[in-house]
Image (cartoon, helix red, strand yellow):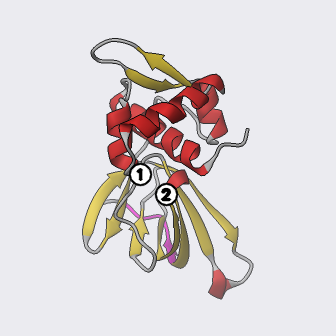
């Protein structure tokens, strides 16, 4: 299913906020995150509803909820059990949920990159930031490097890997 950039950004934000609160998300809340008007978010929700990726919840605590199809469209699992890892940036640590860390090119040791897909928005990340992620829950790896690209609509960063260490324990 092909979504416009705006639709993907709205759907990603909806899924992120829904997973954080486990409750319907209002158009106002989505609009504040993506810097759009609530009216434009509501207009996009009409088309997302017709695609079967969003349902509306009426009432004073209502808003929008993603369907199972929304998770599939974004390539994400609707996991109840999610492990958090530590993201360190400029000596500041933040607990985030990382969905996946992929190493698309590890054949050349001087050009190793990693794609890090977060379950939620990490708005402070920018190109050229130095970050470290980990240790991961199972393998206890820490991946560190410089951010080469940030994809806000997919909650993903491309990292020029400087160091991969493991096993590392948090202390």
Q: CA distance from mark 1 to mark 2?
A: 7 Å
Position of residue 8 measured from the top left corner of the image (x, y, whole percent):
57, 45
Which mark identifies residue 11?
A: none
The residue pinned by badge 2 equals 152
Task: State the residue at coordinates (61%, 41%).
Answer: 74
Disc 1, disc 2: CB below 8 Å?
yes
Magenta-colored span: 162-169
Task: State the residue at coordinates (47%, 19%).
Answer: 56
* Residue 48 makes an appearance in the image: yes
Q: Quick check: 7 left or right of 63?
A: right
User: In what element is the residue under mark 1?
Assistant: loop
User: In what element is the residue under mark 2?
Assistant: helix
- Magenta stretch contains residue 138: no
Q: Vertical placement of 130 versus 76: above or below?
A: below
Quadrant where the N terminus is found in the figure: top right
Task: State the residue at coordinates (28%, 75%).
Answer: 90
**Outermost residue toward the top in this view:** 59
The residue pinned by badge 1 equals 121
Position of residue 154 measured from the top left corner of the image (x, y, whole percent):
55, 52
């Amino acid at each position: 299913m092909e979504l416009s950039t705006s639709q993907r950004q709205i759907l990603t934000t909806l899924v992120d906020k829904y997973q954080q609160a486990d409750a319907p998300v209002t158009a106002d809340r989505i609009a504040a995150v993506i810097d759009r008007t609530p009216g434009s978010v509501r207009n996009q929700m009409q088309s997302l509803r017709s695609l079967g990726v969003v349902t509306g919840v009426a009432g004073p605590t209502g808003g929008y909820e993603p369907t199972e199809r929304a998770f599939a469209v974004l390539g994400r699992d609707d996991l109840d059990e999610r492990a958090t890892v530590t993201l360190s940036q400029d000596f500041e640590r933040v607990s985030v949920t990382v969905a996946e860390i992929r190493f698309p090119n590890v054949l050349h040791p001087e050009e190793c990159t990693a794609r890090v897909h977060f379950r939620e928005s990490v708005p402070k990340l920018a190109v050229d930031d130095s970050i470290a992620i980990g240790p991961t829950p199972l393998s206890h790896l820490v991946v560190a490097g410089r951010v080469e690209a940030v994809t806000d609509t997919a909650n993903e960063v491309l990292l020029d890997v400087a160091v991969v260490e493991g096993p590392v324990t948090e202390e």
